[in-house]
Amino acid sequence: MFKQSLIASALISIIGAAPAYAAQLTGKVVDANNQPLSNATIHLHGKSKSVKSDKFGQFTIELDADSQLHISKPNYLDHRINVTEEQGFVRVELTPTSVESIVVYSSALHKNSMEMTSPVSVLSGDELKNRAKPTLGETLKGQPGINASYFGPVSSSPIIRGLDGPRVKITQNGLDSSDASRVGPDHANTNDSLAAQQIEVLRGPATLLYGSGAIGGVVNVVDNRIPTDVIESLQGAADYSHDTNSNTNTYAVLLESGFDGFNFHFDGVKRKGGDYETPNFALPHDEHEEHEHEHEGEDHAHEAEEHETEYTNRVDNTFIDSEQFNLGTSYVGDHLTVGFSYGRVDTDYGIPAHSHIGHDHNHEHEEGHDHEEESVFARVKQDRWQGLVNYAVHSDWLESVGLRVGYTDYEHAEIEDGNIGTVFENDTTELRLTAEHRLGEWHGTVGYHFSDSDYAANGEEAFTPSTNTKTHALYILEERRFGDFTLELGARVEDYQLSSKGNQLEAYEEDHEHEGEHDHDHDHGGNLDNGFISYDLEMTNLSLSIGGVYDFADGQNVAVSLSRSERAPLTAELLSNGIHIATSTYELGLGYELEGDHLHFEPQDVEQETSNNLDISFRKFSGDFGYTVNFFYNDIENFYYQALTDYIYSPEHGLEVADHAHEGAVPVFKFESSDAKLYGLEFDAHYKLSNFARVKVFGDSLTAKLDNDEYLPRIPSNKLGLDYEHSYENLTANFTVTHYFKQDNIASYESETKGYTLVDMSFNYDFEFMGSDMVGYVNLDNLTDELGFVHSSFIKEQAPLPGRNIKLGIRGYF
């Protein structure tokens, strides 16, 4: 793969062999009162590098052709200005915005969040660092339209508008994070918020750039592990925080340096903590025991009545012990930017509510306790290499050519009583080649995207087969400005290939071809458990989009986006066949059919999942009052979902009709496809009360139904929040109240989830120490110690949200 990178670099260098003579352009960035604005980003269109304005608002950048400058700064509207080599000096005035406006790296066309046709949220700067949690789901769940799957606080993935798992792509600098978080909710993603510059969430289908796995949206973690700006001196940051609830200590460090265009980067995060505490809650009853009491004699029934409900105020086996670091280097020249990085993740974390027959899982994890003795925990290791080549051509039509490559070696081992149980592995190679161009009045990008993923699972919990998934895709995204209206068009064609190896299921079907229809004496469990079958699937996924942004007034616009996106099933959706211990279910994929006590593999009728999505956004981002309101309607054909069957599974009896219960039996869920509709709204409104105070109201609402009018399972509760921020000199205080409504729009086999209200406060104090800028911060989470259950969690009754927590931290910059 990296040979390809080197070859591409050499070819691009040949293209740029012609000499270029750079001219210097100086400038000054000011506000409406002619006061200098520091730390504004000045980006030369078509190039990867940028410069920052100094404390006097001044900057210098080199030009080798007439071009366009893109000037951006948080809380100010982006400004674009055409410049020439002979110009010499330029003055730029930025207009403040009431809604945060940040350049979105995943947009591909250098747009900020207020210019996008599709809704986007961005967390960055100190706000991101203060909100950072061990998982992306917990870090982002307060954003409108975004929630978390919540398999405990250390395994929680983002849910976007009710969609997660295989429908939400999690990327790092535009390349897939390539872990196993889409296989099951107990598998944590490997991206750490503290190592990020910003985190971007693209709502709605983002399949044009990122593939069919982004049919529900994209979470892109942006870091500087491959520096694309010139670093001229040693700079960095350090952070330490302590969480009282779980006794967690977190250390983070960032170091960057450079000389004569060569840059170096290092960042690292270490986090260690114990089980988290909750308000007192009742542990769920064992359903099997209840069933036995119902059908046994009066003595047993009397015992059941006398059985006292067990309460606890701690969720066992939720510890975390994590270390990760990233090393990167780059060369940034006038035309060429080339870089390479390596990242390593080593994380152990407990898996709550992870039960096995005959296993005891009531050990407590305390600080200093050896988690080798814990019942079940995950040990995650990941090595990640990335390469970048970008060449600014600056011809009349071709602006730049970029290449990103990545290789990820991932392993997730589940340790049971000190022994390795099941091991999940995923080796992924990915390449993205893009060409940014201008053709007349059209500006856009065309690209080729390749991905090759080798997934393997070995052990008693390997409910999905080892699979190779390969995609080749071509895509194009174009935009054109017509006065106050910007039109955007896009298309992607993707060749999707899935190949898996089979085992004993083929023999099982042959042996039982002539058996009776209901032979319950036969031990089906030994034959059906992990009974995978070899299978090859090839589909062509087509995605199309059209959208536009109309600036109908100063600082106001409306954006409309219409897209049609196709997705082929992933391994877990198509070929699952086994016990998924984490969710206490037996899972069967789309390709299987149950007839009596026989299991058949019949994938002929599997069709692509197709999303027809409409987004309408209204935005006001100037003046003291601003807002963003998004309305969406997603009509999905052949929506893949898990349906509860009339079967149960136990190791002793195998698969059988659930007319009576067995010890250790679990329900059988089978993936089905049916048309579905998801629709709702998200809003975020700000009002500036004074130069020191700001109030914000935010919320979301979602309805998700199948065509038979049944609700989809585990759909997040609606939420409504109020946020008040007050600044005085060096102190900033924030007060947030978020109410999660009762969720009673549920699937037939679900239980309702009560509503709850979370009250959070934070205080930041900026000061200087020995010439370095420092920030001391205190976060008070769940101040009222509210008991909250997350409806979107598979283990909501066993793992409520953490109780009151005080987070103390200090951060320094140099």
Image: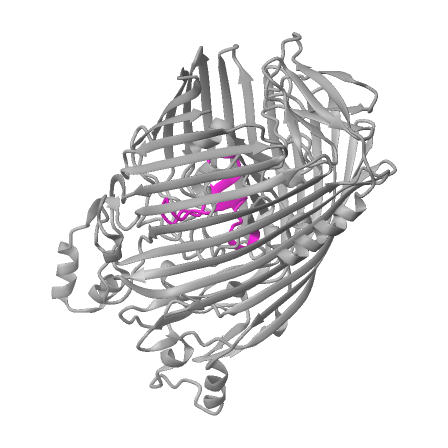
Task: Kindly identify the residue that appears in the image at 69 percent across and 36 percent down.
Answer: 333
657 vs 286: above or below: below
Residue 5 placement (x, y as % from top left): 66, 53
Q: Main secondary structure of the magenta part?
A: loop
In this picture, residue 609 sits left or right of residue 552: left
Residue nearest the observer in this picture, 290 or 203: 203
Residue 344 in view here: yes
Does the magenta portion include 161?
yes
Task: Kindly identify the residue that appears in the image at 58 percent across and 45 percent down.
Answer: 218
Residue nearest the observer in this picture, 97 or 397: 397
516 vs 351: above or below: below
In this picture, residue 677 sits left or right of residue 43: left
> Which residues, given as a range, are shown in magenta?
141-168
194 vs 402: above or below: above
Does the magenta portion include 481?
no
Residue 551 placement (x, y as % from top left): 74, 26
Residue 701 placement (x, y as % from top left): 52, 38
Residue 453 placement (x, y as % from top left): 56, 62
Residue nearest the observer in this picture, 763 or 572: 763
